[in-house]
Image (cartoon, coloured by chain):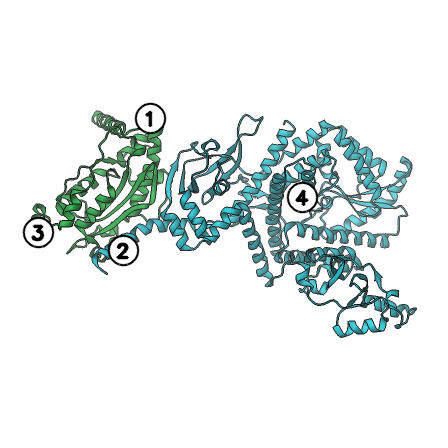
Amino acid sequence: MTKEEAFSQAGKTAVMQNVHGTMTFLQSYPPFNAMEAGHLAWMVEHCQLRFYARGESIIRPQEGAVQDFYVVKQGLIRGERLVPGQETPDTTFEIGVGECFPLAALVGERATRTEHIASEDCFCLTLPRVHFIKLFKLSTVFRDFALRGVSSLLDQVNQQAQTQAAEQLGEQYSLETRLDALATRAPITCQPDTPVREAVKRMHEASVGSIIITDQGLRPQGIFTLRDLRAMVADGGIGLDAAISQVMTGSPFHLSPSHTAFDAAIAMTSRHIAHVCVVRDEVLVGVLSERDLFSLQRVDLVHLARTIRQASDVEALEAMREDIRRLAESMLAHGASSTQITRIITLLNDHTVCRVIELCIEQHGDPAVPFTWLVFGSEGRSEQTLHTDQDNGILFEADSLAQAEQFRTKLLPLADRINHALARCGFTLCKGKIMANNPELCLSRTEWAERFDRFIRTTTPENLLSSSIFFDFRVVWGDASGAHRMFEAVLDKVAGNTLFQNRMAQNALMFRPPIGRFRDFVLARSGAEKDTLDLKTQGLTPFVDGARVLALANGISECNTLERFRQLCDAGVIEPLDAGAYEEAYHFIQLIRMQQHQKQARAGERFSNRIDPDTLNHLDRRILRESFRQAKRLQSSLALRYQL
Amino acid sequence: MNALAWLPRLRAPKLTEEQLERRAALPPAQPFDDTPLHDTRLVVLDLETSGLNVHRDLILSIGAVAIEQGAIHFGEQFERTVFRPNHQVTETVLIHGISPSAIEQGGAAGTTLLDFMEFAGQCVFLAYHAPFDHRMLTRGLRLDLGHKLRHKFVDIAELAPMLCPEAELSRASLDDWAAYFGLNNSQRHNAAADAMITAEIALILLSKARAQGIVTLAQLHTRLGHWRHLRQARRGGL
C-alpha cells in the first residue's frame, strides 16, 4: 500500500466512524434492522442531517411532490390534517425516533396529504428523492417496507407472535393452510349401490375412517363412517350385503379447496362431525378428517368440544379449562389471529355453558318452563378471552304478570345453580350481579321489552351503562326466535331516538386512548398501577363502544365489534379505509392482551389487562401506539357526527 | 530532541511542484458579507493536537463536517490523521486517544493540509473555542505549506450563550451544551465525532439565529461583536 493509499484509507475509516454511529442507531429500528449492512451504509453516506425547532413545519401539502425521505433521529413529529368543519387541525399521527415518513407520498410521487410538524426540537436524517429511488431498487427489504408501510410491520408482529408461541410448542403448523394443501390423498369412494361389505373392505384396506359415496361424476352423495358402521351393527336391522346408500348419511358437509384449516375446524366443532369433504365445482377432490387437521394430540379442538358436550358432571368441565387455555396457546402458535382465537374460545365457552345448563337441569329437575339463556357484554359480542366474567340472563314467555312471577320463582333456583356451576368452570361471578339468578334479569319477554324501552327513553348514566352491556346480546341456549323479535324492536326504537344515540355517543368518548399529544403513552402515575395502561378499557372499549353506537343507530343487529365495522362499511356508514384501520388496530390490541393473558396463566398469576408498555418490544410498542391513535380517530369522528 | 528543530521548516517548507500548484489554486476565504447564512458553506472543525500550547504543539488530526443549506451532509466529512516523525507520547494521548501507531500511519502534513483546505473551500469555519483551532490551523498552514490562512472563524462557545441566554451556561464545555440540547454521541473525543456533535449544535444554533432575525453573515458578525462588548462591560462592572 503506498502512503497515499494508506492515508486515504485511514481517512475513510475515520469518517466511517460517524457513518457507523448512525448505522448503529438505525439498526435498532425496522426496516433498517433487516437491511444489508452495505445498503444501509450507502444510505447513510447519502443522507443529510437537519434540525427542526419545535413547531416548525417540515413538509406541507401545498409544497408539491415530496423531495426527501425522512427518518427521525431525535424528537417527535406530528401529522396534522384539517378536518372540514373543525377549527383546529386534527393530529392524525405521531412519528417518533427511528420512524420514517412520508412513504406513501414519496412512492406515489405526490405531495403529502398531512402537514408534518416538529412537536419538539427534532433532528431528522433526510435522503433526497433520487437516492431514495436508488435505495428502493437496491434493497428488497427497504422496498417492501416503503410499499407496504405499517402493514408490513404488522406482518412482522404476527410473525413474531407466532414464533414466540411456537417456541413454546416447537411445531410449525398454520391454521391458514388451504384445504387443498392438507387433503392431498385421493379420497376413498364408492357408488351408492356398492354393498356395505365391499365399502368397509375398501376403508379397511386404505385404513381410513370414512368413505364417500359419489355418483358417476364423482359428485358426493353421502358419507359412511366407522361410527355409522358401529351403529348399524348394534342396530342389526340391515345386513352387510345391503346397498351402502341405505345406511349412508346423505348430502355430506363440504368446503371448497380454498377454505382453510380454520374453517374446517370450526365446521367440525359446531356441526359435531369428524370428516369434511373437499369439493371443487361439485366434484369431490379430497376428504379431511379431524386427525388430518390436528397433528397435535393433546390439544384437539374438535375432541375438546365433543368432550365438553359429553361431560358427565361439572367437575369434568372444570378440569377442561386448562385444556382450553392450552388450545388457545397452540392456536396462537399455529398462526391463528386474535379474532380466530376469540371465536374458538367463545365457541368452547358456549359449549360449556350449554353443558352446564343441561347438567344443572338434570340434577335440579326440569322447571317445566321453557326458557332461553341470554349472554351479554363480551360474551354477547363473541369476544371472550381466557379472562371471562359472567354476564347472563333468562328470557321466558308468560301470558301475564302473575304468570311471569310464578315462572320466575320456578326458574331462579335453577339459574342460581347454573351461575355457581359456571363460576366453578372459570366464569367469574359478575360483581355487578348481571346474572340470571338476579330476579331483575330473569324476565318474560314483555318485561325485558319494558326494561329495554326504559333504557332508551330515560338516558340516565346507569341506563346508558346498562345499554352498553345489554345491547350486546346473544342467545346461547334455548329457543332464539323470541329474543330476535325483542332485539328488532330495540333497533326500531333506537333508530327513532336521536337523543339516545347522542348520549350513547357521548358515553363512547368516556374512555380515552392513552396517548398524549407530545408523549408516547399516558400511563397511570401512582399506586400499584403506576406506569401501566389498561388494554381493555383504554384500548378496546373505544372501538367496542363506537361500533355499538353506530350499529344500533343504523339498524345493524350484529353484536360482534369487527362484524359491526364490516356491516357499517357495507352500509356506507364508515369508509372502507377507516373500517380496515379500525379492524387492524382492534386486532392488534386484542393480540397483545391475549399474549399477556397467556403469560399470566402460565405463571399462575391473576389475569390483568394492565400492561407496562416498556415491557413490549420496540415494534409492538410502536404499533400499539398507532392502534390507540386509530381509537382516537374513531372517537373524533363520533364527536363530529354527533356534534359533541 | 532539539526544541528548535522545526525552525528551518518555518522559513522554507519543502513542497513539490504539484503541491505548489494546488496551494496556488486554493479557493479564497468567505468574508463576513451579506451572504445569507443559509447559502454559506460552513465547515465545522475539530482539531486534535499534541498539546494545548499554540506556539509549540502540532496538529495530530483534523475532523470536519460541512453544513450547506441548513443540513449536515454525511457524505461530506473530513477526517485525517497527520504523520509526525518522532512524535512523543504525552498525556494528551489520554484525551484525544490517537495512538502513536496511528500517527505513524497518518498522511504527510503538507498533503493532508492541502486536502483539508480543498475540502473546506470557500467557507466560514465553525469550532468550539474557535480561537484555539484558528491559531493552530494558521500556524500549521504556515509551517507545513507556507500558506496564510485568511478564512473567518465563528466560535460556537460564543454563539451558543448569545443565542441561548436562558441556558445560563457561560463557561460551559462542548459536553455541557450537548447535554443542554439533549444530544448524545457515544464516540466522543475522536475528531470526526467531536466535529459531528459540534455540527449538530451548530444546526440548532442556526435555527435559533434565524428565529432571532439573524439572516446574513454580516448580521451574525455584528451581533457577536455587540454581545462580546456587553459581556466585557458586565464583567468590568463586576
Q: Position of residue A15 (x, y in %)?
A: 30, 50
Badge 3 vs badge 2, beta-carbon distance below 8 Å: no
Protein chain holding label 2: A
The answer to which quarter of the image holds residue A122 is top left
Looking at the image, residue A447 lies above or below residue A415: above
Q: Earlier in the sequence, mark 3 or mark 1?
A: 3
Judging depth in this view, the residue of A238 and A367 nearest the camera is: A238
- Up-down: is A484 above or below A268? above
Query: Neighbour class for label 3 at 10 Å: few (<14), some, many (≥20)?
Result: few
> Distance from label 3 to label 1 (Cα)?
51 Å
Q: Nearer the viewer, residue A549 or A106?
A: A106
Q: Secondary structure at mark 4?
A: helix
Q: Amino acid at mark 2?
A: Gln
Q: CA distance from mark 2 to mark 1?
A: 43 Å
Q: Which residue is mark 2?
A: A9
The residue singled out by tag 1 in the image is: B213
| SS class, disc 2 | helix
Quarter of the image with the C terminus of chain B in it: top left
User: Secondary structure under badge 1?
Assistant: loop
Residue that sits furthest to the right in the current view:
A237
